[in-house]
Image (cartoon, rainbow, N blue to C red):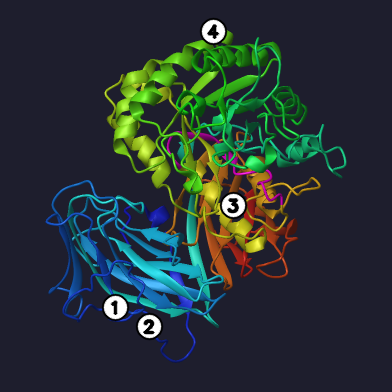
């Protein structure tokens, strides 16, 4: 732990673990790297074998080296930046629904911030932690629950900058890796919150909305719902909403000539290439769509102030003869439609944020071979459409895709070429904790050769975000909702991020059990949506500095404009936690405790409830957390 010269933060976080008698088995094989070398496998799926993934031959790699804590250690050395996936991997066997602790020691170049990760066999992260290095060995600890998995991957991203899938030049070392079950154990934690030190300000009111599905959202077409879309949006409490769900938006156009009223349809149609094609009629019109006027009117009735909407552009690149049809005079049609849509929104008094295209550089969704785009083609689309939007409504905002592949060229070309048209950037952040999609945009903005005055005013809006890992099943229950709450907290901490939209209100399956859904098919909030409403009510306008050493056990702190402080203590570990909380700069002796918990981690009806007051004793608030859930310590002004 780093020394602190400020007496008020001497003990920032102490972890006292109550261990059962007897030594536990280390599930990582050769965690002290005494073997001669690493295996080289294509898939790295053999349990108990260290596998080195080196993307570029001759650019360095992994070796065992002397100088470990008690013998050999693993050494990473890379001579040039560029590879996004330099890492070391070992598959370990685990017991489902069991809590585990990972411990490891690292040292190396101070500009590196390696990541250790527990990931599924599909490479989707379960839990991650990172640490800035020094010349001395330092321990890093990570806690996670195995969920339904019987095998998981331990991964070391040795040249990372704090996020997975990044790799830069430098040298780092790893030693004494262990992974052990936490059965029968508990943790006592101390944490310090600094009430007068904001790490981020300017968080808008009600910052979290949903991305509405165009096919199963409309109150006009689903009047039988027990709770209307308007009332459900109001329950969410977000001041923002996004239209058209996602991938499907890129083949839609909101109207037909003269583009003065809603009449949504496909701008280009091919039944095998249109995502959710079962909702299209053969003529390209939609089954029970959410039209643009209802999107605005229902949102405003629910208290929404900021509306996000995708302008579909794939028809510009669809190849004649390969699609069933493309609308006539497609370029002029899309430009005229954008101007008409902006004007329609202005006349309705709505504040619109227009996204030009959705995930435009991703051109192969589920092998449907969608329309391919280049950065140069996207630049031309922005130059055509952005001025049309401003002609329709000078106050409307224009957003550009921020590159969804790990494609540095995309943003490096687009930003200087269309900087004068950009009002905001669009990023999509999935997984429980990963920030690499956001970091990629921030890094591109920072290095862009454009005036600082532009950089300082550009926000990043996460128009799709969730703890969901695309391609992996996810439940809609207590445990998954806690991860989703943590995902939103991570987002709120990130530089430039303002509004965000959970994906989605109701996915195509419209199933209450799916963690992709915030709203119940019959209306009302599911657990994944309820935790968004908690953030919207209690986020405040700033995130506070929290001293914690265990990033896999998140703690967030917010401050409201009236001076009230909320501290959120999360438990995703699956064992009891006991927190001693110090809040520097707060004068209130008494605080209120609220909990989000249930009967077990798979409870689909968790509850948010007050559990009464707690008093500060000897400068500390003592808070006991259930095995799964989160607790809010709320201090008045």
Q: How many numbered discs, if any?
A: 4
Q: Which residue is mark 3?
A: 485
Residues in magenta?
A: 494-510
Give neighbour class at mark 3: few <14, some 14-19, many 20+ (Cα, 10 Å).
Answer: many
On the image, the x and y values in percent for residue 110 come to 21, 53
Give neighbour class at mark 4: few <14, some 14-19, many 20+ (Cα, 10 Å).
Answer: some
**Residue contact between numbered discs 1 and 2, judged by CB atoms under 8 Å:** yes
Q: Of the two numbered discs 4 and 2 on the same chain, state the one appearing first in sequence.
A: 2
On the image, the x and y values in percent for residue 267 come to 58, 25
**Residue contact between numbered discs 1 and 3, judged by CB atoms under 8 Å:** no
Q: Of the two numbered discs 1 and 4 on the same chain, state the one appearing first in sequence.
A: 1
**Residue at horizontal 80 percent and vertical 37 percent from the top:** 231
Q: Which residue is mark 4?
A: 391
- In this orientation, which residue lies closer to the viewer: 181 or 566? 181
* 500 magenta-colored: yes
Q: Of the two numbered discs 1 and 3 on the same chain, state the one appearing first in sequence.
A: 1
* 325 magenta-colored: no
In this rendering, position of residue 451 left or right of residue 514: left
- Give me the disc on residue 31: 1
Is residue 196 visible in the rendered structure shown here? no
Q: Which residue is mark 2?
A: 26
Task: Determine whether the residue tagged by mark 1 lies in a helix, strand or loop.
Answer: loop
In this rendering, the label closer to the viewer, 4 or 2 = 4
């Amino acid at each position: 732990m780093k020394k602190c010269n400020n007496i008020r933060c001497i003990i920032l976080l102490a972890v006292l673990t109550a261990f059962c008698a007897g030594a536990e088995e280390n599930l990582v094989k050769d965690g002290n790297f005494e073997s001669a070398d690493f295996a080289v496998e294509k898939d790295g799926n053999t349990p108990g074998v260290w596998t080195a993934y080196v993307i570029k031959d001759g650019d360095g790699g992994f070796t065992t080296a002397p100088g470990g804590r008690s013998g050999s250690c693993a050494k990473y050395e890379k001579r040039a930046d560029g590879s996004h996936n330099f890492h070391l991997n070992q598959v370990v066997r685990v017991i489902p629904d069991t809590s585990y602790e990972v411990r490891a020691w690292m040292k190396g170049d101070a500009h590196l911030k390696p990541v250790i990760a527990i990931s599924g066999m599909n490479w989707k992260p379960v839990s991650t932690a990172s640490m800035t290095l020094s010349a001395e060995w330092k321990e890093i600890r990570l806690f996670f629950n195995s969920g339904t998995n019987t095998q998981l991957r331990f991964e070391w991203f040795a040249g990372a900058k704090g996020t997975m899938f990044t790799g830069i030049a430098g040298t780092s070392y790893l030693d004494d890796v262990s992974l052990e079950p936490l059965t029968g154990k508990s943790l006592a934690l101390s944490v310090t919150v600094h009430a007068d030190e904001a790490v981020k300000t300017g968080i808008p009111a009600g910052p979290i909305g949903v991305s509405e599905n165009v096919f199963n959202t409309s109150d006009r077409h689903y009047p039988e719902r027990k709770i209307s879309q308007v009332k459900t949006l109001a329950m969410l409490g977000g001041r923002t909403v996004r239209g058209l769900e996602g991938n499907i938006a890129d083949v839609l156009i909101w109207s037909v000539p003269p583009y003065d009223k809603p009449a949504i349809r496909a701008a280009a149609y091919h039944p095998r290439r249109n995502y959710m094609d079962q909702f299209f009629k053969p003529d390209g019109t939609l089954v029970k769509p959410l039209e643009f006027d209802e999107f605005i009117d229902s949102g405003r009735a629910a208290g929404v102030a900021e509306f996000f909407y995708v302008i579909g552009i794939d028809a510009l690149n669809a190849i004649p003869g390969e699609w069933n049809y493309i609308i006539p005079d497609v370029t002029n049609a899309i430009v005229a439609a954008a101007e008409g849509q902006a004007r329609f929104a202005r006349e309705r008094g709505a504040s619109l944020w227009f996204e030009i295209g959705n995930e435009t550089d991703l051109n192969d969704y589920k092998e449907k071979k969608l329309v391919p785009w280049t950065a140069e083609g996207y630049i031309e689309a922005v130059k055509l459409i952005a001025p049309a939007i401003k002609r329709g409504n000078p106050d409307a905002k224009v957003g550009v895709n921020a590159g969804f592949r790990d494609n540095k060229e995309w943003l490096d070309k687009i930003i200087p070429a269309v900087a004068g048209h950009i009002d905001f950037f669009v990023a999509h952040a999935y997984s429980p904790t990963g920030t690499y999609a956001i970091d990629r945009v921030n890094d591109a903005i920072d290095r862009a050769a454009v005036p600082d005055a532009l950089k300082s005013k550009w926000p990043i809006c996460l128009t799709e975000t969730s703890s969901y890992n695309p391609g992996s099943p996810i439940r809609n229950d207590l445990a998954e909702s806690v991860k989703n709450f943590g995902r939103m907290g991570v987002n709120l901490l990130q530089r430039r991020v303002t509004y965000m939209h959970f994906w989605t209100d109701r996915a195509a399956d419209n199933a209450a059990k799916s963690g992709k859904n915030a709203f119940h098919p019959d209306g009302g909030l599911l657990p994944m949506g309820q935790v968004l409403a908690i953030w919207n009510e209690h986020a405040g306008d700033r995130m506070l500095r929290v001293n914690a050493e265990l990033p896999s056990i998140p703690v967030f702190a917010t401050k409201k404009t009236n001076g009230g402080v909320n501290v959120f203590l999360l438990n995703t570990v699956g064992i009891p936690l006991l927190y001693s909380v110090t809040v520097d700069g707060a004068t209130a002796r008494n605080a209120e405790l609220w909990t989000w918990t249930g009967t077990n981690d798979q409870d689909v009806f968790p509850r948010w409830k007050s559990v009464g007051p707690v008093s500060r004793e000897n400068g500390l608030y003592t808070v006991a957390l259930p095995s799964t859930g989160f607790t809010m310590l709320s201090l008045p002004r």
